[in-house]
Image (tube, grey):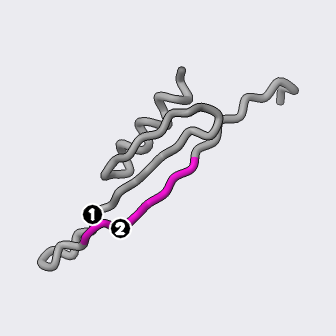
Amino acid sequence: MSDNQTITSFVVRCALVDVDEVTLKKQWRIKVSHVQGEDEVVVADLEDALSFMKRVIEE
């Protein structure tokens, strides 16, 4: 392990927006904030949240 570490942190907040009465499918509002930067995104599914985090990490 190297002494020169890079740490990237995210805050992920998931808020339940709605539940379909027929299918019981949940709709989420997911806010992802990059702690070290000023970037943040609001998405509806986890895949988009992970895509944002991947983009930040690969920059």
Q: In the image, is 32 to the left or to the right of 5?
A: left
Q: Is residue 5 above or below residue 41?
A: above
Tag 2, which secondary structure? strand
The residue carrying mark 2 is 16
Q: Residue at x 41, y 41 (%)?
A: 41
Foreground: 28 or 51? 28
Which badge, 1 or 2, is on the more N-terminal residue? 2
Percent x, y of residue 45: 33, 51
Magenta range is 11-18
Q: In the image, is 38 to the left or to the right of 17?
A: right
Q: Is residue 59 above or below residue 27?
A: above
Foreground: 43 or 22? 43
Percent x, y of residue 59: 54, 20
Percent x, y of residue 38: 55, 33
Percent x, y of residue 49: 41, 44
Q: Hey, what amino acid is under mark 2? A: Leu
Q: In the image, is 53 to the left or to the right of 29?
A: right
- The secondary structure making up most of the magenta span is strand
- Marks 1 & 2, CB-CB < 8 Å contact: yes
Q: Residue at x 44, y 50 (%)?
A: 31
